[in-house]
Image: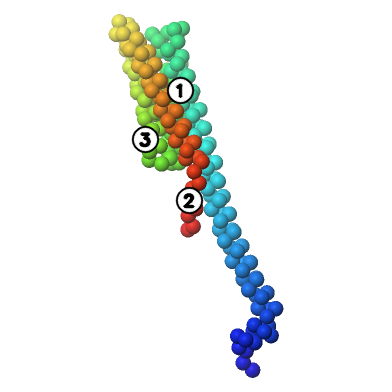
Amino acid sequence: MEITLKDILTTYWAQTVLLLATLGFLIKRLFDLRTKRIEMKQSLFQQNRNIAIIRFIDAYVGLQGLYRQILSQTFDLNKIGNSNFYNLIDDKYEQLYSSYFYFKFFLDPLEQVRYADLVKEMQNIFSKIADVATKSSSDDKNLMIADLKQYISEKLKENNDNIKVIGEIFRENSTKHFPVRLK
């Protein structure tokens, strides 16, 4: 006996519907699992990106706070080379650089340039502090201290303006929906 399409649709309609429903359910489950996997990857990416920016901001604010201490009138810059303060600044700068290095994996090229500029400015301030710390002549050192304080003040103001722009870009990018790429 030969089974035709007409027989399948009329005689075996219940089995045909069950088979098609099962196939449809399995296909839907496969797409749901794939979509869920993509959503989980995106969520993990966002979570790691947020952790990275928090680490960067913590390191930046810590280093900025130390630089602001230098601007205070009570801090004696003549003793900076002999104090633990210089080592503390060095440690904070290393924290900033390592957090930036990790964070830049999550940044697009435009954002990388802006954050790199912040890190470079903080490094320039650190270099000037190192120059003051290594000077032995007190006359040269006093002139350098005055220049250093002015330089730090200017650069911190510039960095604050850059941070505002970066914050706007970050908020913009955080609200965008990332395109879903199926692999």
Specify the quadrant of the image occupied by residue 125.
top left
Q: Circle 1 sits on which residue?
A: 63
Disc 2 and disc 3: Cα gap in Å?
23 Å
Q: Report the residue marked by disc 2.
A: 179
Name the residue at 67% across, 84% down: 10
- Secondary structure category for the residue under label 1: helix
Q: Are marks 3 and 1 in contact (CB under 8 Å)?
A: no
- The part of the image, by quadrant, that contains residue 135 is top left
From where the camera sits, is residue 82 visible? no
Residue at x 43% of width, y 13% of height: 70
Q: CA distance from mark 3 to mark 1?
A: 20 Å
- Report which residue position mark 3 lands on: 113
Residue 2 x %, y %: 62, 92
Sort mark 1 into few (<14), some (14-19) or many (20+) by Cα contacts within 10 Å.
many
Q: What's the amino acid at mark 3?
A: Val
Q: Amino acid at mark 2?
A: Pro
In front here: 49 or 139?
A: 49
